[in-house]
Image: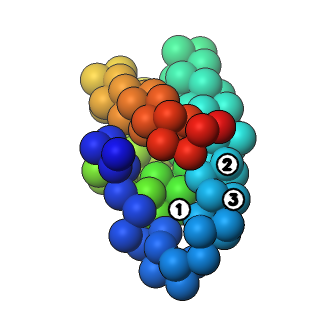
Amino acid sequence: MEQHYKLFRVRELADNDEDFIAALAAAFLEEVPVDAERLKKAVADGDYFNAYQAAHKMKPTVDLFELGVLDTLIEVQDWGKFEKQDVDVSSQLEIVISAVDKATEEIKSDFNL
Protein backbone atom coordinates (compact mmCIF):
# COMPACT_ATOMS: atom_id res chain seq x y z
CA MET A 1 0.00 0.00 0.00
CA GLU A 2 1.12 3.49 -0.89
CA GLN A 3 4.22 2.43 -2.75
CA HIS A 4 3.59 4.43 -5.95
CA TYR A 5 1.45 7.14 -4.40
CA LYS A 6 1.02 8.74 -0.98
CA LEU A 7 -2.16 9.54 0.92
CA PHE A 8 -0.71 12.00 3.44
CA ARG A 9 -2.09 15.10 1.69
CA VAL A 10 -5.29 13.31 0.71
CA ARG A 11 -5.90 12.35 4.35
CA GLU A 12 -5.15 15.91 5.42
CA LEU A 13 -7.60 17.31 2.85
CA ALA A 14 -10.24 14.75 3.83
CA ASP A 15 -9.65 15.27 7.55
CA ASN A 16 -9.22 11.47 7.75
CA ASP A 17 -12.78 10.85 6.50
CA GLU A 18 -12.32 7.37 4.99
CA ASP A 19 -15.39 7.68 2.73
CA PHE A 20 -14.07 10.94 1.29
CA ILE A 21 -10.61 9.41 0.84
CA ALA A 22 -12.19 6.50 -1.06
CA ALA A 23 -14.17 8.98 -3.19
CA LEU A 24 -10.97 10.85 -4.05
CA ALA A 25 -9.28 7.57 -4.97
CA ALA A 26 -12.22 6.70 -7.23
CA ALA A 27 -12.03 10.15 -8.83
CA PHE A 28 -8.31 9.58 -9.46
CA LEU A 29 -9.13 6.34 -11.28
CA GLU A 30 -11.89 7.98 -13.34
CA GLU A 31 -9.90 11.03 -14.41
CA VAL A 32 -6.14 10.55 -14.43
CA PRO A 33 -5.78 7.45 -16.66
CA VAL A 34 -8.09 9.06 -19.25
CA ASP A 35 -6.10 12.29 -19.15
CA ALA A 36 -2.84 10.32 -19.39
CA GLU A 37 -4.07 8.61 -22.56
CA ARG A 38 -5.11 11.98 -23.98
CA LEU A 39 -1.64 13.31 -23.12
CA LYS A 40 0.09 10.35 -24.80
CA LYS A 41 -1.92 10.80 -27.97
CA ALA A 42 -1.41 14.56 -28.04
CA VAL A 43 2.37 14.25 -27.68
CA ALA A 44 2.52 11.52 -30.33
CA ASP A 45 0.47 13.71 -32.69
CA GLY A 46 2.43 16.89 -31.93
CA ASP A 47 -0.81 18.42 -30.66
CA TYR A 48 0.57 21.10 -28.36
CA PHE A 49 -2.79 22.47 -27.26
CA ASN A 50 -4.23 19.13 -26.11
CA ALA A 51 -0.92 18.12 -24.53
CA TYR A 52 -0.95 21.32 -22.51
CA GLN A 53 -4.63 20.91 -21.57
CA ALA A 54 -4.26 17.27 -20.47
CA ALA A 55 -1.08 17.87 -18.48
CA HIS A 56 -2.52 20.97 -16.85
CA LYS A 57 -5.64 19.06 -15.82
CA MET A 58 -3.57 16.20 -14.36
CA LYS A 59 -1.26 18.38 -12.24
CA PRO A 60 -3.42 18.92 -9.13
CA THR A 61 -4.28 15.24 -8.76
CA VAL A 62 -0.75 14.03 -9.48
CA ASP A 63 0.42 16.50 -6.85
CA LEU A 64 -2.29 15.59 -4.31
CA PHE A 65 -1.53 11.87 -4.55
CA GLU A 66 2.22 12.59 -4.57
CA LEU A 67 3.16 10.44 -7.54
CA GLY A 68 6.60 12.04 -7.52
CA VAL A 69 6.48 13.19 -11.14
CA LEU A 70 4.99 16.68 -10.86
CA ASP A 71 8.11 18.44 -12.17
CA THR A 72 8.32 16.00 -15.08
CA LEU A 73 4.64 16.52 -15.87
CA ILE A 74 5.22 20.28 -15.86
CA GLU A 75 8.01 19.79 -18.44
CA VAL A 76 5.52 18.01 -20.71
CA GLN A 77 2.91 20.68 -20.03
CA ASP A 78 5.36 23.45 -20.91
CA TRP A 79 6.30 21.62 -24.12
CA GLY A 80 2.69 22.02 -25.18
CA LYS A 81 2.15 25.48 -23.72
CA PHE A 82 5.17 27.00 -25.42
CA GLU A 83 5.00 24.78 -28.53
CA LYS A 84 8.61 23.65 -28.14
CA GLN A 85 9.05 22.12 -31.57
CA ASP A 86 12.78 21.57 -31.03
CA VAL A 87 12.30 19.56 -27.79
CA ASP A 88 11.61 15.84 -27.48
CA VAL A 89 9.53 15.13 -24.36
CA SER A 90 9.02 11.43 -25.02
CA SER A 91 11.27 10.34 -22.13
CA GLN A 92 9.51 12.71 -19.71
CA LEU A 93 6.15 11.50 -20.98
CA GLU A 94 7.15 7.87 -20.38
CA ILE A 95 8.13 8.69 -16.77
CA VAL A 96 4.74 10.33 -16.16
CA ILE A 97 2.75 7.53 -17.85
CA SER A 98 4.66 4.86 -15.93
CA ALA A 99 3.97 6.61 -12.61
CA VAL A 100 0.28 7.01 -13.45
CA ASP A 101 -0.02 3.35 -14.50
CA LYS A 102 1.66 2.08 -11.32
CA ALA A 103 -0.40 4.35 -9.06
CA THR A 104 -3.60 3.39 -10.90
CA GLU A 105 -3.01 -0.33 -10.39
CA GLU A 106 -2.05 0.17 -6.76
CA ILE A 107 -5.06 2.39 -5.97
CA LYS A 108 -7.39 -0.13 -7.64
CA SER A 109 -5.93 -2.85 -5.43
CA ASP A 110 -5.74 -0.83 -2.22
CA PHE A 111 -9.31 0.47 -2.47
CA ASN A 112 -10.85 -2.61 -4.14
CA LEU A 113 -12.02 -0.51 -7.07
Q: CA distance from mark 3 to mark 1?
A: 16 Å
- Circle 3 residue: 23
- Circle 2 residue: 26
Q: Secondary structure at mark 2?
A: helix
**Label 1, residues with CA under 10 Å away: few <14, some 14-19, many ≥20:** few
* Residue positioned 55% across, 36% down in the render: 108
Q: Tell me if 113 is positioned left or right of 98 in this view.
A: right
Can you tell which of label 3 and label 1 is closer to the viewer? 3
Q: For residue 60, which numbered disc appears in the image?
A: 1
Q: Secondary structure at mark 3?
A: helix
Give residue 24's position: percent from left, percent from top.
Answer: 63, 59
Give residue 102's position: percent from left, percent from top.
Answer: 39, 30
Up the image or down, 85 lies above or below 81; here it is: above
Q: Secondary structure at mark 1?
A: helix
Quarter of image, res 93: top left
Q: CA distance from mark 2 to mark 1?
A: 15 Å
Q: Amino acid at mark 1?
A: Pro
Q: Amino acid at mark 2?
A: Ala
Looking at marks 3 and 1 on the same chain, the residue that comes earlier in the sequence is marked by 3
The N terminus lies in quadrant = top left
Whether residues under marks 2 and 1 lie with C-beta atoms below 8 angstroms apart, the answer is no
* Residue positioned 52% across, 78% down in the render: 16
- The total number of labels drawn is 3
Whether residues under marks 3 and 2 lie with C-beta atoms below 8 angstroms apart, the answer is yes
